[in-house]
Image (tube, helix red, strand yellow):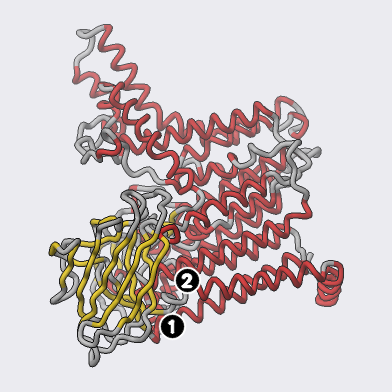
Amino acid sequence: MIDKPKDLKNRIKENFNENRIIVISMLLIWVSVIVFTLFSYSDSLGKVSSGNEFYEHAVELSEGVTVTEIVPIVQDSDVIAFKFATYARKNKGSFDIRVKGLDSDKIYAEKTVKVSSLQDNAFATFRLNEKLDQAVDSKIKITLSSDCEAKQGVGVYYSELSAFENSSFDIDGERYDGDLSLRFLNDSEELSLFYHIVIIWVISAFSLIVLMIFLIKPKYETLFTVIAIVFGLTFWLIITPMSAPDETVHYEYSFQMSNYMMGEKDHLVFDEEYQNYGSFAGHLNVSAAYERFIKKINKPLSLKGKMVRMNNDIEETYHVCFIPQALGITLGRLLKWNMLRTFYLGRLFNLAFYVFCVHIAIKKTPVHKLMFGILATLPVFMQQAASYSYDCYINGLTFVIIAFLMKWMHQDELIDNKEFVIVLIANLMIAPVKVVYGLFTFLFWFVPEKNYGNRKNKIMRTLILTAPTIYQFVALLFPLLFRILRKIFENLFPAAVSAETVDQLISDGIRSWNVEGETYTFSYVMNHPLEALDIILRTIRYGIKNWFYGSFGRALSGDSLILPTYLVHSILGLLVLSILREEEHTGNLFFRFLIISFCVFGGMMIVCGMLISWTEINQEIIADFGGPIIQGVQGRYFSPFLPYLFIIPNNSKIRIPKKFDPYILFAFIVLVFEVVVYVLSYTFMN
């Protein structure tokens, strides 16, 4: 029930009077964070970047190494940037940068930089003393040097391809082909306008959430619904079109669903205007997309009449998870909106579905509301929800399923028939998409018998709930079981059955699993089990750390936007604090062991699935790995496991009082604000 304006006013006044010092202190901290963060990134925000886009090599800045670049200037630039590598280690010492005008001998910048302040594989900016002017200097000379010990300095990226005309690039006086990873930044009216629109929205909306936390103190389902909407709309704006993983493919699938909805005869065809991806970049946030947003968001629809075929057919995948996006596209087409508006409307409908799922989940679960809410609104979850990705569909349904699991396990009354239908529908929707995520419905066997009324009802209803997952597992594993049995039979009775007879017993679908090709198959794995096991173990050894960090958001955009380490560790720390919060109930040890077992089994299914569907047999071997590894496994594939994994640490001994909830939430808002500004800064330099 929503508070009346008078009641809301009284609540705000009462909370402020009771916690005046705390509220004022938090607001002052919040304002300080905003000012400090924007000042720290002021060199890149709202600017256009130009320069070298190729940088495949790096030279370490250590003692005795001097890197020099003479390059023509870009008019009116007042900031330059380079991409650095820390080699994923903790480096000590510093390096010097000097920028000098070649014609005027002016010193535009001279600075000593601590290498510990730099992020790995990220650009760092350096402000010049004044804007570059071609009338004063046609070229500048950039010198980078360091006194760091070997393997203690950072590397600066460079390319073997020349990005600038009439430039020269030297390392220790020896001329090299190519150029440094140099970028010039200067002001842009369009980017500046986009930046101010976004930052005003972010500061206003995030400030509203801070006030809600300390003055209104709403129920968690209300608070996290608002947070999900605010965060979702923010990432809806700042993650550029086609940047989220596989968004181009998912956009085409969604448009095909829209064609079905509108009765189009050929679902694989759309007007060339809707395939206008100009200014966008696949799997990479680029500032050109922001410029296009400002310039063309209000442009009238102008269909070219030239129909083009899409590259990906939705008939090869599951349809239902693209319905929300398709509804948005269909509405945009009916309203005769241009491609850009229609695209963003499809994203918006996907976000709305996810927000609805989060609201239901937080409302229904009697425990772990804080942890579920923070987890559900992490930047990586919101990025996927505000894109065309069907990860939104999977993640949203996962939260709904675990919320009802928690509710049924801890309630005293009988299970409501409507709730039973909701859970059944959720599992019917998720199991066919990715059966591995439906695996956790087997945890419903832990719901107490009394909540079903009697043992018979529990067995029947739980079998009904798990039936979609059981069916999918049988359909998935049958080809593998058949291959194993066939192999055993052939070894025992080599002359008993001909190859033609065997082929008659195998359907086209099963046979397709066993076709030898460029990737590993069931047949190859069965014939080389030790080799397959070696590849799996090697992949886990080298990938598990990245998968874990990636599952809750180490990388955004198309896994190309790597967040600073301190942000990733801070988010992880908040998740741990949120689950150690005091709760009325904690799960028993066997229940936790089963969750871990399901996560391990599910993880192995993901890894093995990528082995036989994605990994090339004759792949290029990276020396650090010591052999081939499984390709294509990404951290976000493990994200749906997190709601289950993070309930495991909750216990009856280490308990953080609920009175600390507002401060944990405040810290979360601050961290997401930092992420947003970092994403903007990253994008403006691309």
Q: Residue at x 71, y 59 (%)?
A: 663
Q: Residue at x 20, y 74 (%)?
A: 70
Q: Is residue 265 visible?
A: no
**Residue 311 occupies quadrant:** bottom left
Residue 618 falls left or right of residue 642: left
Q: Nearer the viewer, residue 275 or 573?
A: 573
Residue 199 falls left or right of residue 220: left
Q: Secondary structure at mark 1?
A: helix
Q: Nearer the viewer, residue 277 or 120?
A: 120
Q: Residue at x 22, y 32 (%)?
A: 515
**Residue 204 occupies quadrant:** bottom right
For badge 1, the amino acid type reads Ser
For badge 2, the amino acid type reads Leu
Q: Nearer the viewer, residue 412 or 505?
A: 412
Mark 1: few/some/many CA within 10 Å (<14, 14-19, 20+)? some
| In the rendered image, the vertical position of residue 165 relative to residue 356, given as above or below | below
On the image, the x and y values in percent for residue 524 come to 25, 27
> Which residue is identified by label 1?
192
| In the rendered image, the vertical position of residue 609 relative to residue 281, given as above or below | above
Residue 337 falls left or right of residue 104: right
Q: Quadrant of the N terminus?
A: bottom right
> Which residue is identified by label 2?
237
Mark 2: few/some/many CA within 10 Å (<14, 14-19, 20+)? some
